Amino acid sequence: MSRDPFRRGAGDDIKRALSKFADVLMPQEAEEPILAPNVRAAVFEWLTEVRAADDLKAVGIKPRRTALLYGPPGCGKTTLAHHFAARLGLPLACVRSESLVSAYLGSTGSNIGQLFDAMTETKGKVVVFFDEVDALGGRRMNDQGASVERANSLNVLLRRIERFDGIALAATNRQDFLDTALWRRFDMQISVDLPTEDERFAIIKRYAAPFDPPDEDVDLLVDLTSGASPALLRALMEGVKRTLIVGPKTGRKIDDPVEVFAAVVAACAPAPEYEPPPLWNLHGVPGAIPSLASMTWPMPRGGGK
Amino acid sequence: MTEGHNGGAAADMLIDFVESIEGLEVEKQAISDKIKLVKARARSAGFDIKVMNQMLRERKESASAREEFQALCEMYRAALGMLNGTPLGEVARKRLMGKKAPPPDAPEGGEPQPEADEFPAEDLEGARAAGRAAAREGKRIIDNPYLATDPRRAAWDEGWCAETGTDGMEVPAAWRRADKRKKKKPEGDEKPEGGDA
């Protein structure tokens, strides 16, 4: 690893400054994102725009600074934000929303203020990411009790985002619950949805490594995982690898793919808000798991990546 | 200081000092022997002792002193023609030239150059070339060696993307199908609107 000492030092300073409210992910820790073409296009355009700040300034405009990523949970919103920050060479500060919310009157707003003050001190050397921003920016309902406190905190958040000079991203899987003023406050709203066929193929391949199942087997899994999130696909493939290693030690037979996958499927389930993919829809799709009997087994090992 | 027989108290004090120093010298030798042993172990583990000694020296310095020293080394190497043809050498050479005398087309009055002018087009082209080379070597796009504030970072990224013909977010070949899918797409697996991840 040839990281220069200056960069490492700067990262440590940022971690220290933001540790109360955020986890800081460094650029070199970013993973390759697996994104739909339209999301990639939006991200690439934004990157180019941020880099063309001087050219834009010459015509009197600034690059967009804020984006809201919305879509089902586990679809790679954090990975996307991390990749975006890494391309710019900046750390990503993932704000822990629960660390901002407080039961004491006025404290949530005060915490939000402290966070933005700390961020300002980093002088734009960090990209901020509010995961599950709906925890802070849920729709304002009425003017009573806790709702007033929530509304006040949201007002602070709106004001500080407006004045923030750095780059900020936020993510939510409850876009219908998000306050419309907060929604509008972002320069961009990017939908990060469930992966399609080609993306599922890549995700299964990625998390199967160092095993390298033949393409026909991966395609079989692609069909049976239609509607699965990247997080669920990861849990599935890591579960299979775990079973292959740990299974023999616990007396589990691992010479039959159907048994191995059945055990993994029983132990990891899609989030309740999803329509279950065929592999998990044990009542609706008879034979989904048995069809895995045609897989090449044991799974061949490849070079891995 | 009082005097006694044969030097008295002063002589005793001197003996104390000398013996203390001799004791410390023995300890120093013992520690030095231990360091030699550790280095011998490192050598037998395959490490280059010359490089390790350099790292030990550098770790004793502050980050800013180290950076300054390295920048000076770049300039010296460039002046001696030891970096010819590399983007780094080109940058160092230009910095060196900038220190000696302003270029002939510099603005009158020796006004400070705008920040972007620290990286003339040739430097950016050098960074682009380095990005292209990195892509050919299979480096990841996030392995960009330039800092966030350095205009060459974007140029390196551009070079990487140009070489691969992608936006830097392409799914790696190892995770793609070797051939187009032969099977018919099952029903209900159409691409949802608005994008995926």
Image (spheres, coloured by chain):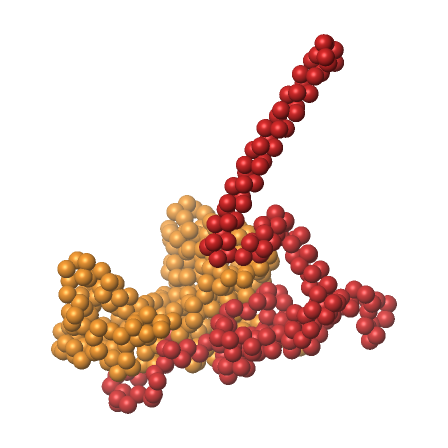
Chain colours: A orange, B red
Residue B105 visible in image = yes
Q: Residue at x 62, y 24 (%)?
A: B19
Q: Nearer the viewer, residue B117 or B81?
A: B81
Specify the quadrant that holds the C terminus of chain A.
bottom left
- Compared to residue B12, the image places residue A207 above or below, namely below
Q: Nearer the viewer, residue A132 or A10?
A: A10
Q: Quadrant of residue B102?
A: bottom right
Q: Residue at x 38, y 51 (%)?
A: A146
Relative to residue A142, is residue B28 drawn left or right? right
Q: Residue at x 43, y 68 (%)?
A: A31
**Residue ranking furthest to the top:** B5
The image shows a total of numbered marks equal to 0
Q: Nearer the viewer, residue A5 or A224?
A: A5
Relative to residue B25, is residue A253 drawn left or right? left
Relative to residue A24, is residue B80 drawn left or right? right
- Compared to residue B190, the image places residue B127 above or below, namely above
Residue B160 horizontal/vertical position (percent): 54, 77
**Residue ranking furthest to the right:** B109
Residue A235 visible in image = no
- Compared to residue A175, the image places residue B158 above or below, namely below
Q: Residue at x 26, y 83 (%)?
A: A216
Relative to residue B115, is residue A285 drawn left or right? left
Q: Nearer the viewer, residue B185 or A238?
A: A238
Q: Quadrant of residue A197?
A: bottom left
Residue A55 horizontal/vertical position (percent): 65, 76
Residue A142 horizontal/vertical position (percent): 38, 58
